[in-house]
Image (tube, grey):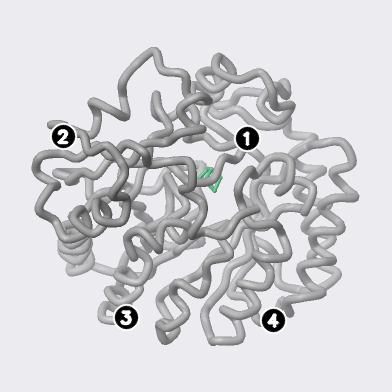
Amino acid sequence: MSSEKNLHKGNFSRIYIEQDAFDYPDTQKLLKRFPKADHIPIDHYKQVLNRNNQNWRLQKANQALVLAVRRDNFLYEGSDIAPDFGHQAFYYNALVLNCLYDCSYCYLQGMYPSPHTVMFVNNEDFIRHTLERVRQGPIYLCISYDTDLLAFEHLIPYSNRWIETARNHPDLTIELRTKSANYRAIRLQQPVNNVILAWTLSPAKVAEKYETKTPGLHRRLEAMKQAIADGWKVRLCFDPLLHIPGWKQHYGELIRETFAEISPDQVEDISIGVFRMSRQYLRRIRKQRQDSDVLLYPYEIHDGVASYDDDVKREMTQFVAECIADYTPEEPVII
Ligand code: SF4
């Protein structure tokens, strides 16, 4: 467990900077913040991120920072295995690629050849393109997708900037999903009706064993409680459910501990989803690491997605939904 300000400790001794990114204020701020880092000019962030034959695990122990300018793909249409919570126009963006946390089950390990953190410094271009789309009709946008954005807020305050944007554009609903306890980083903002703060919650034992570097369950619950007390819309995500030994006991305790702290009437909605990952990513991850039972589980593949077989899926989602039903008549969203 670590405070967000220390999360990058041991990392960022190298900063790669696209030539085009140099003059952006966020670049200058970050270069001052890491004065001892080696500054290495590059033409394109993919030269670092997509370098092949890298040892992902070794690099994760010393992640580099890459400062880049996004030139296209400011908005992506939501994928089929991600929840849209009933919104017609579901998008996500990628302001940061990769994460400061190190969850064993994270698909990012199979998505990019390296774990280095790419931060796009032209946030205003993302906002401009998004608002062009919003002019055609309301959209639902996940801004913390291939990363955990709130954990980066002390480096570039993306979340604050997007909350401000949503405040001024009611047709833009944003979801900020996190495992971070860094709520104080956005606490000075007045709550906004079209912003949902979504916390992923896992049993304390799962967080400890499989969600390296994340704040534990109790710190996340404290952050959520404060956000609810301040008037934010908060979403609870019990996702991914992992079929580990003693899972019923762990997830039963998680639901009890959560609702001992948080009244279900005060949350916007609750979602549950079992572990799922693109088959291709899982194959790549297994080539690099054999140290996690979660990755070695004999998953079934359907339509290119690896997950538990239907019986296990049903048993897990039903069990967790029944535990939730002890506290609220509202049905959870099952993903
Ligand atoms: S917090 Fe999310 S994005 Fe970050 S390592 Fe964990 S699963 Fe991956």
Q: Is residue 313 left or right of residue 144?
A: right
Describe the element under mark 1 as helix, strand or loop: loop
Residue pictured at 76% horizontal, 74% vertical: 329
For label 1, the residue is 104
Q: CA–CA distance between discs 1 and 4?
A: 32 Å
Describe the element under mark 2 as helix, strand or loop: strand
Residue type indicated by callout 2: Pro
Q: Is residue 107 above or below residue 258?
A: above
**Badge 1 or badge 3: first in the primary sequence:** 1
Residue pictured at 42% horizontal, 86% vertical: 190
Front in this rendered view, residue 218 or 258: 218
For label 2, the residue is 41
Q: Are marks 1 and 3 in contact (CB under 8 Å)?
A: no
Describe the element under mark 3 as helix, strand or loop: helix
**Badge 1 or badge 4: first in the primary sequence:** 1
The image position of residue 252, as x and y in percent, is: 86, 56
Q: Which mark is residue 167?
A: 3
